[in-house]
Amino acid sequence: MGKKARDTFIIGDVHGCYHTLLALLKNLPKKSKLIFVGDLCDKGNFSKDVIEFVIKNRYLCVKGNHEYLMQTYIKKAILQNDMSSNWATKRGWGGKQTIENYREDMGLLQKHLRWIEKLPLYIELDGFFITHGFGLPYYKRKHDKHSHSLFVNRIYDTTFMKDWEDFKNYKVVNIFGHCNFSEVLRGKNYICIDTGCCYGNKLTALNLRTLEILEQKTDKRDI
């Protein structure tokens, strides 16, 4: 295990659950380095606060599909009152809460959108491949036209199964979110840490050195 992975924790999908995030971080060593797997926003009540917290503390984060959705639709929703997208209207997409977060704070919205635009689609660290979606099938193609799959692919999708014999032997461990399970899902060379915080379950942190997990029950104020 390299030095960079020591005292580093990977944080699962926060989805605007700011109070839950703060409670979880109280249980981590004070000088821990944090990497977020994306989907900081939408569904929960405090997307703006979560994103600002991550920015102020200069934590690393990969882009999730909900950062992409926010980046794509929020300006039209607020400035043009264009609520035609599924993100803005359908409860399961979670955009309504985020729109209300920023409606009276366009300055902060512009700042956050500039930050989101620059987010990487993956972080590779000491043999770990950190993505938002199940990125392992696309590891060898992470720079080509399929790179968007790094934040939209789900492990229970079936389209990648023909490649299983190839990527199951990759010499990296893919840590990702995006796929909601009640408990952390572990495979031979992947770990999914989205444990449904925004659905009232819990938020998970993974210790990159020991691969142990810490969990925090969702704070009711967040959902």
Image (cartoon, grey):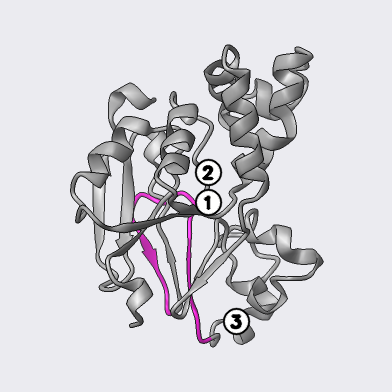
Q: From this view, report whether residue 98 is shown above or below residue 34.
A: above
The count of marks equals 3
Could you tell me the amino acid type at mark 1? His
Q: Is 27 on the left-hand or right-hand side of 9?
A: left
Q: In which quarter of the image is the N terminus?
A: bottom left
Q: Is any part of residue 222 visible from this angle?
A: yes
Q: Are marks 1 and 2 in contact (CB under 8 Å)?
A: yes
Q: What residue type is labelled 2?
A: Asp
Mark 1 and mark 2: Cα distance apart in space:
8 Å
Q: Residue drawn 75% across and 12% down?
A: 81
Query: At label 3, which amino acid type do we have?
Result: Phe
Q: From what the image shows, is residue 10 above or below residue 89? A: below
User: Picture quarter containing residue 186?
Assistant: bottom left
Q: Residues within 10 Å of mark 3 (few under 14, many from 20)?
A: some
Q: Name the residue under label 1.
A: 178
Reading the image, the residue beneath label 2 is 39
**How far from the left and from the top, in percent, is residue 160?**
68, 70
